Image (cartoon, rainbow, N blue to C red):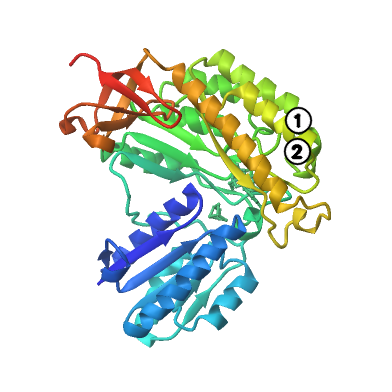
Amino acid sequence: MKYFIEVWGCQMNEHDAETLGGLIEKKGFTKADNYNDAQLIVLHTCCIRAKAEDKVIGRIGALSKLKKKRPEMIIAVGGCMTQQEEVAKYIEKRFDKVDIIYGTHNLNEFDNLLSTVMENKSQVKSISDADQMDIREYIPITRNDKLKAFVNIIYGCNNYCSYCIVPYVRGREKSREIAYIVEEVKELLDSGFKDITLLGQNVNSYGKDFKDETNFSMLLKELDRLGDYRLRFMSSHPRDFDLELVDTIKNTKNVCHQIHLPLQSGSDKIIKEMNRGYTKEHYLALTEYIYKVMPEATISTDIIVGFPGETENDFLDTMDVVENVGYDQAYMFMYSIREGTRAAKMENQVPEETKKERFHRLLELQKKKSLERNSEMQGKIYEVLVEGLGEKNRLTGRTRGNKVINFKGDISLEGELVMVKVTDYNTWSLYGELIGE
Ligand code: SAH
Ligand code: SF4
Ligand code: F3S
């Protein structure tokens, strides 16, 4: 029996799908390469924007048709989208071919849900309260990569940014015990992983729900002792990212000087309406300090355009921050109304046309900045972890700043650290040559 998981959304969801894979393989299934070879198909969903949800509904429709021809097929749909009660009800009613519907905290019992369906041939639905999470340890995780691995450190989010659905579908923050995190990272390093990313909606909140003094800086220092490797984390919240943390990153040997610092908006008025709790000035001072302490740091961000009430001047504030910081990468989104959030009820919604027009201006500016950032790397030498073959049969790998460089070399170098000199670049790519060959 084979299974296939399709996953939408953030890295946390991607990692959840690896956990699902582990539980499914425990039941004797092996991974299929596509839908057609699989008896079990899982759609692990996201609801951050309307577009993400529309795609999933389309996919369930197509799979329901396929199931008419292959009635033995099992279809499961779950994750953030089905954690919303009305959506779960809609899917249950509208698509009787769906066998399993599970919530964000119920993926931990997926092995049991699967057994029920296989034994009773009936539809099952299991959705717990988003705030009721029991962290389950020692799940055998199927890793999608041999060098890079994700490790959860904190689940849920307490921030309630006014546009965002995540706190409603992922529940309140719950940190994972430091001992389990250390154990998982140790095991990963022992089995050859070289690049570890710690995951949380707001990693800077790590430990705040514990009774003791544990915090994110302490966790980084503890993990730094475990060997020689690359340690990353995401996402950070500009409100909670203190200067001491910047110093910690600087003073550890393994933590990469790569920071994902979502801006969302550069306008103080909009940042306030978004309930983000910082100002443009604070944000700029923070990025300035990061570059001062770690001049070679790379910074990336998330930005929303067209939040309710955003005027041309507010938007220009966002453009100003993008111009000033010089992000290596920016993920940009048009504001999407999410029912149940505070911003959905705001009356001054921005017309779609304006959102599109601003989005394109921002995109053009970021393209210019990405090119500028890449040009600064020209002629310099970087330590690259070789990931494998990329375009045109060249090797591809990442710097500690998470920049991808393509270069000629032998595939036997896969998994090795090599030194590469950047010889060419464009907006999206960097090219180089191996040093010492
Ligand atoms: N916890 C992370 C990101 C979570 S979602 C953080 O706070 O940084 C990823 C990104 O999706 C957000 O940073 C935001 O830019 C975007 N996003 C969230 N809700 C959105 C909405 N309603 N419309 C458009 N973009 C949204
Ligand atoms: Fe959403 Fe804000 Fe939490 Fe990020 S910090 S998940 S944007 S509520
Ligand atoms: Fe989407 Fe859920 Fe992540 S809504 S962005 S998959 S936390």
Give the camera-side residue of 161 and 66. Answer: 66
Give the camera-side residue of 306 and 49. Answer: 306
Label ID, residue 142: none
Give the camera-side residue of 210 and 261. Answer: 261
Circle 2: element type: helix
Q: Quadrant of residue 192?
A: top left
Q: Is residue 9 visible?
A: yes
What's the CA distance linking mark 1 and mark 2?
A: 7 Å
The yes-or-no answer for disc 1 within 8 Å of ligand 2 is no
Q: Badge 2: few (under 14), some or many (20 or more) residues near its Cα, within 10 Å? A: many
Position of 206 with respect to 428 (left or right) is right
**Where in the figure is residue 104, as x and y percent of width and height?**
53, 62
**Where in the figure is residue 376, as x and y percent of width and height?**
46, 16
**Is the residue under label 2 in contact with that under label 1 (CB below 8 Å)?**
yes
Q: Badge 1: few (under 14), some or many (20 or more) residues near its Cα, within 10 Å? A: many
Task: Say which amino acid is labelled 2.
Answer: Ile
The residue under label 2 is 271
Label ID, residue 279: 1
Task: Say which amino acid is labelled 1.
Answer: Thr
Of the residues under marks 1 and 2, which one precedes in the sequence?
Answer: 2
How many numbered marks have been drawn onto this rendered protein structure? Answer: 2
Q: Residue at x 68, y 40 (%)?
A: 358
| Quadrant assignment for the C terminus | top left
**Where in the figure is residue 246, as x and y percent of width and height?**
57, 22
| Quadrant assignment for the N terminus | bottom left
Q: Residue at x 41, y 57 (%)?
A: 17
Q: Quadrant of residue 399?
A: top left
